[in-house]
Amino acid sequence: MATNYHQAACLGWVFSTTECGIAALSVTGEEAYASVEMQGQATWHDWPTHYLQHVPEMIETVLRKLQQHGWRFDQPGFLSQSWRQHDLALVGIDDEPLIPAPSWQCNGGQREARVLNRDVVDFAKIVGRVEPRFVAAKLPWVLAQLPGLRKELKRVVLSGDWVAGKLTDKWRLSASDALCNGLLCQETKQLATTALRQANRQLGGRLNPKWFPDPIASQAVVGRVRTNRQATWTPLTQKLKGWRVVAALGDNHATAAGCGATDLQTLVVSLGTSGTINRIVPTSTSLRGKAAAFEYWDHRLLLMMLGQCASWYNLFCNNYAAGLSHKTLNNLAKTADLNKIRRVACPPDQVQTQDTFTWPVLDRLAQPEQVASVQFSIAREMLQRMKAMHQEVKGPNAGLKRVILTGGLSQAPLVRAVLSCGLERLLPQSTVWLNHRPGPLAVKTDALGALYNALAAATKTTVPQVIEKQSKLKKCRPTMPDQKKQIDALLTSDKDWSLE
């Protein structure tokens, strides 16, 4: 046990598909991160789910890891959560889940989504178009599989709301995730009671608005942690007694905040495991409908994705460059003859980074051209999505003035050079910045977003203000100036590489 201690002031809890982690910020500004593997994965009616009963044990384990490095939690602070989007908790009379929580990967509600979008008058107009993974479709699908659950059902919430409820004994519906689950009116962010009541009749009583608690704004405090007498929760709630629990965020919302999204004129591009492009728009903005939309405090968050980004690159490294460091690979890419590189296709989503995988187009290339081919291909795919995101907003005031690059692959000189050249043509009025946040939270953007949400509540400021203060940005300098003309020519006139 360390002799010097760090008094925790804010915590950002993260619950992803693979990990349960905590980002910690001390009263003097130190940061830490610890995690354990996600527990409780299960299958229910052939779809992925999670047993939420593992949550208190996982959080306690992570807190103990932090304590072993000198962290203390005996002075109440603020905590918030980042949760897998669309995670559904059906809660019984004992405040325990009746079934394992259907995850974002559960698309069982396909028929119900069609009914809501097609047959319930103005439902999609009020709450947004419903996808099968949304709670509005998944809940009636679950109840169709087990009709008897209706008699036992006390309330329906998102999984982050269930955790907040167990900690505080206050039950609210977090607007961040509820807004993209077909439950809230898009204009008011209030429960769409009338629309849900009409849908409930159409679906035979399987979408009753009485099951949902009142919504709560993303930055609002749900309540203080109270001692929970249930054995599995008692140690955790005693340890964190008095801490204020801030409303949970959906993981897309939290990740965008952790990446640095703050204003209406900034595009945030993350080149992590998945590639994401985020921009913030007013809720009244007219859109073309190609981007996914989520709540982002007072605005709307738009998201476009490249499902495989750094994972695509890691798959290549494991199969073509095992044992070589990223620095070595980046140097190889810088020496490549760009006249010889070839466009490489993104691998299918089901391919994992440890799988054996080949691209025949690479077989005749030397290693520098192989590395450059993959890096250039990934950068081009991201540029195509940036172009689509820029075009997503209709009408005036659609200009973007700043692009922030973050994530592991943003450190690769060739990737940065390709992105910079492409952005000069796509967004000539913008400047490109690099997020070079140091420390243990540099790549933990979902946990960082939850931490920012807690810190904003603690300091009584807005999350964008917190992000601007906490982010570490530097101007993106030219990385390969000698190849700029050649890169530009490939992106503008080459039949394989052109962005047109």
Image: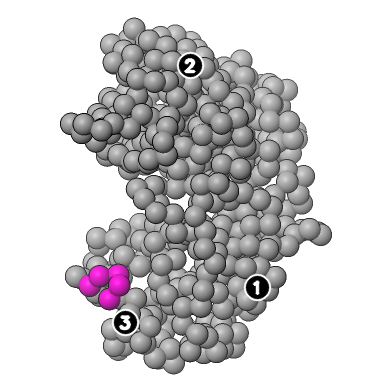
Q: Nearer the viewer, mark 1 or mark 3?
A: 3
* Badge 1 element: helix
Tell me which label, 1 or 3, sits earlier in the chain: 3
Please name the amino acid that badge 1 sits on: Leu
Tell me which label, 2 or 1, sits earlier in the chain: 2
In the visual, does 289 lie left or right of 381?
right
Q: Position of residue 124 (x, y in %)?
A: 69, 38
In which quadrant is the C terminus drawn? bottom right
In the visual, does 264 lie left or right of 69?
right
Q: Is residue 326 magenta?
A: yes
**Circles 2 and 1: CB distance less than 8 Å?**
no
Q: Which residue is mark 2?
A: 224
* Badge 2 element: strand
Please name the amino acid that badge 2 sits on: Arg
Q: Evaluate whether residue 259 shows in this view.
A: yes
Q: Which residue is mark 1?
A: 426
Above or below, 181 relative to 57: below
Residue 332, disc: 3
Q: Is residue 461 magenta?
A: no
The magenta region covers 324-328
Please name the amino acid that badge 3 sits on: Leu
Q: Residues within 10 Å of mark 2 (few under 14, many from 20)?
A: many
